[in-house]
Amino acid sequence: MEGMILLSPPHIGMAEMDYIHEAFADNWVAPAGPNLEAFEHRLAEVSGRKSALALSSGTAALHLALRVLDTVPGDRVYVSDLTFVASLQPILYEHAVPVLIDAEPVSWNMSPLALERQLVLDAQAGNLPKAIVVVHLYGQSADMAAILQLANRYGVPVIEDAAESLGATYQNRPSGSHGLLSAFSFNGNKIITTSGGGALVSDRNDLIDRARILATQGRDQADHYQHSQIAYNYRMSNVLAGIGRGQLDLLPDRVAARQGVFRRYRDGLADIPGIGFQSDPENSIGSRWLTVIDLNPDLIDLHPYQFMRSLRAQGIETRPAWKPMHMQPLCQGMRFVPHTGSDAVAPGLFLRSLCLPSGSAMSTAAQDRIIDAVRLIAQEG
Ligand SMILES: *Cc1c(COP(=O)(O)O)cnc(C)c1O
């Protein structure tokens, strides 16, 4: 790994250590504490929500979102097909049934066309889903106006998987402030990190209060230890929340840095025919968590893996885009709803795309090296 330019390494600042020291000095090393409260308070502000609950991972946040909506075995839950598997796993934890909704070609996120077709069918059958889990892929918001309009028409709650989109905006409001509940991730590779962590946010204080109880072993209101429901140990520790406080102060810088990385790639590769990017739809500014290039096979005669291997040999880490859920062994037999009746979009995006190093601490010299390498491979291929 020495000397490798990594895809999205953690980027830690100076203030985090001060908050961690505070936790030690005050002996608030164990679970709850002032860092946790301050982190949750600030995160609610930043994400445009009334309340926030800090957790051990983004996956835990998505799981609790399904639990507070009373998801039970056999319930159907719609979920974006083109995503990281963590969007889907919690549906399986509850023995609910995922229905995989294809992407659309503009934002690469959940297709409102596919969503509508499936909602019409399921409404006719009296079999509407318990929830819709919408991912904001690589930090680019889904077409939430269209999705929320459909969801509201059929009375289905929307959970936003905003793990990659903290700091993005959609219609002048923070990403993660549009659905009923939203999940963020602070894993080491995300926009900001607590080395591992996540959060659930909502304007519905009652849902966050319930999630808080479920995240701490589901203790009933009593002086003794009394429990009447299945629950978890999902809370973030006060020490890690200290890292989160420091990181949250830096969020605008981190997002600006990633957006700058995107612009330099876009400008540096603009004259290579066949290299495209995820677009910023109107009124939507993506976090550009990762910059992903889309290689048009009619103009570039190389598979993304040929780029990936050649770049790796030059010390540059890249990755294919997320493999669609309906192509995963885990998802065999699940229902997949394509963008149009005949055309699926997600498989094409997967087969044509490559994620480039996008860390907020990457130097312009390192990025110039990547741009030169990509140009050379494209021109030689
Ligand atoms: C990272 C990620 C998650 C899960 O977050 P963890 O904190 O790693 O559990 C969920 N969904 C998406 C789209 C992600 O990228």
Image: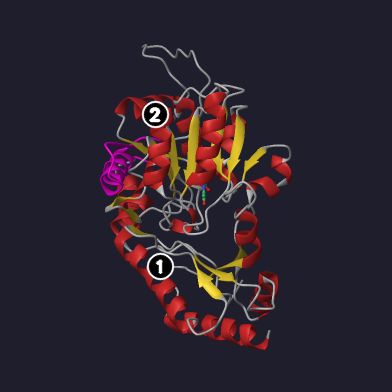
Q: Position of residue 333 (x, y in %)?
A: 73, 37
Do the numbered discs 1 and 2 sit on residues whose CB atoms are within 8 Å? Answer: no
Residue 213 position (above or below residue 253): above
Give the residue type that dot 1 points to.
Answer: Arg
Q: Position of residue 350 (x, y in %)?
A: 63, 60
Q: Picture quarter containing residue 208?
A: top left
Specify the label residue 212 is tagged with: 2
Q: Residues within 10 Å of mark 2 (few under 14, many from 20)?
A: many
- Secondary structure type for disc 1: helix
Residue 57 in sight here: no
Q: Is residue 95 left or right of residue 21?
A: right
Q: Position of residue 293 (x, y in %)?
A: 54, 70
Give the residue type that dot 2 points to.
Answer: Arg
Q: Position of residue 122 (x, y in %)?
A: 56, 28
Tell me, what colour scheme is on the image? Answer: secondary structure
Q: Picture quarter containing residue 2?
A: bottom right
Q: Which sits earlier in the primary sequence, circle 1 or circle 2?
A: 2
Is the C-beta of the residue carrying label 2 under 8 Å from the nearest atom of ligand 1? no
Q: Which residues are magenta?
A: 28-52
Reply yes or no: does residue 48 show up in magenta.
Answer: yes
Q: Is 347 in front, or is 342?
A: 342
Q: Picture quarter containing residue 168?
A: bottom left
List the residue tagged with mark 1.
258
The residue depicted at 66 percent of the width and 63 percent of the height is 351
